[in-house]
Image: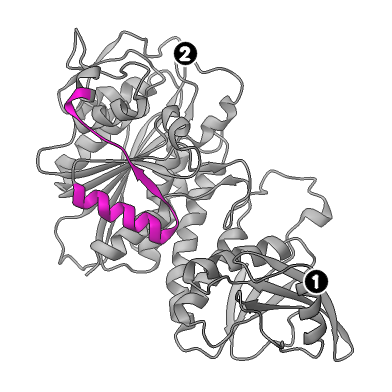
Amino acid sequence: MEIATSPSRPSAADTLAILVTKDLPESLVIDAGRTVLAGAKAARFAGDAGASFETFAEEGGSLLRVLLLGAGSGSDADLEKAGGALTAKLLTSGAVHAAVELPSTVKAQGAARLALGAKLRSWRWDAYRTRLPEKSKPTLATVTLVTGQAGVAEAWARQSALADGVALTRELVAEPANIIYPESFVERCRHLADLGVEITVLDEKQMADLGMGALLGVAQGSVRKPRILALRWDGTGGKVKTPVVFVGKGVTFDTGGISIKPAAGMEDMKWDMGGAGAVAGTLKALAGRKANAHVVGICGLVENMPDGNAQRPGDVVTSMSGQTIEVINTDAEGRLVLCDAITWAQKNYAPEVLIDLATLTGAMIIALGDQHGGLFSNDDGLAEDLLAAGKAAGDPLWRFPLSDAYNKLIDSPIADIKNVGPRGAGSITAAQFIKRFVDEGVKWAHLDIAGMVWADKPGATWDKGATGYGVRLLDQLVADKFEG
């Protein structure tokens, strides 16, 4: 779907959307404005953010679809909801070109946020649907923002890059596991080189030579070979030597291995690479908007399968850091992938700040559902920065504790550490596991986003399915704290 701007309503527009706040106007920009307003009030439309009222009116001898679009208080967040509501209402309605009349109170940034909401809500994944009913096919091709404000096109260019990054993440998460596996995940990200992203890939032999026994142990039951994908964006021209590093869990399908999951719902485990997907999408967004920052994104990519060569409960593996791990449960595999990816990141990039993202624990879904991602950190300042970025971007987080008391729960009687603790505090002990592989002095945060990457029902800016969670959060953090 294309986003355009114009100082006046295009003649080609077959739909007029009029943005209104909770204080409904006395008149509208069409001849039948009073009738439309009366109908809206009769239908109890009050301009709430994300609400809409649809009707038709005659204008110049033609029938015009009219949509009143609630913008609530007129804040950027409410404008984004309004944009999402616009697309949700019109995407498959038969409307082709919607012109959105913006009042003068909506400045450039607000207009861009409305466009972002519209663009995000338009994303669908219909690649494998060969019998889609005609009425279910998208028709909305263009949304034109009608405004005289200066700077709207420039503000939208930044948000457009962000939308492109979210779209890549959604695509990676939505694809089935026979299409996206470690090698094809890498290939799907190759186009980032065209944006100036430096790409490094480690294969199985290189990882073995580096001693990544933890990651390779997860991968050994699958015919799909593991990969480490590193994406580096330096928009500072070499001025910032030390990058901020993001590390994503990329288990492209998780059966649980020998500790196999129940069959019901296992198909959802195609999205167990949501952390790696978010990292790839973030790098696309940053490169797309030419962010003045130095950022490295690392994706640890494996498939966890239960064949005759698969890792067994009770096995002991040696991580790249040299720490030995007793594998109690092969379904606690994400932390085994992350620990080696984090060690490699620290050895190669010596970051001062490192953030990992992972669909790590079912316990996090029990704790927070689909309303917040879980946040764990060894640094209060970084934690506060992430909480603020999440709130601003609409990717909310909730902080959980770390302590030596929880750390002791993953001590192993035969190795340095075991990969699971007792049933209680499962998300915390998972974070404590990862923390053991973070170098002294590195500011680190772990984001457990298990409940956030996939939605069973539509939201304000997404349909059912992949949400793209994490991209906006990390982009906002970079903009707030790491751009020059």
* Residue at x-position 54% and y-position 88%: 104
Image-based side of 175 in relation to 62, left or right = left
Q: Earlier in the sequence, mark 1 or mark 2?
A: 1
* 383, above or below 264, in the image: below
Q: Is residue 206 visible?
A: no
Q: How many marks?
A: 2
- Please tell me how crowded label 1 is: few (under 14), some (14-19), or many (20+) other residues with Cα within 10 Å: few
Asked whether 378 falls inside the magenta stretch, the response is: no
Judged by its main secondary structure, the magenta piece is: helix
Of the two numbered discs 1 and 2 in the rendering, the one whose residue sits closer to the viewer: 1
Q: Nearer the viewer, residue 251 or 408?
A: 408
Residue 42: mark in rendering:
1
- Residue span colored magenta: 380-405
- Which image quarter: residue 322? top left
* Residue at x-position 25% and y-position 49%: 383
x and y, in percent, of residue 69 in the image: 66, 72
> Tag 2's secondary structure?
loop
Image-based side of 197 in relation to 482, left or right = right
Residue 307: mark in rendering:
2
Asked whether 387 falls inside the magenta stretch, the response is: yes
* Residue at x-position 59% and y-position 26%: 265
x and y, in percent, of residue 443 in the image: 17, 46
> Tag 1's secondary structure?
helix
Q: Nearer the viewer, residue 173 or 149?
A: 149
* Residue at x-position 19% and y-position 7%: 414
Image-based side of 204 in relation to 484, left or right = right
* 9, above or below 354, in the image: below
Q: CA distance from mark 1 to mark 2?
A: 64 Å
The amino acid pointed to by label 1 is: Ala
x and y, in percent, of residue 271 in the image: 50, 37
The amino acid pointed to by label 2 is: Asp
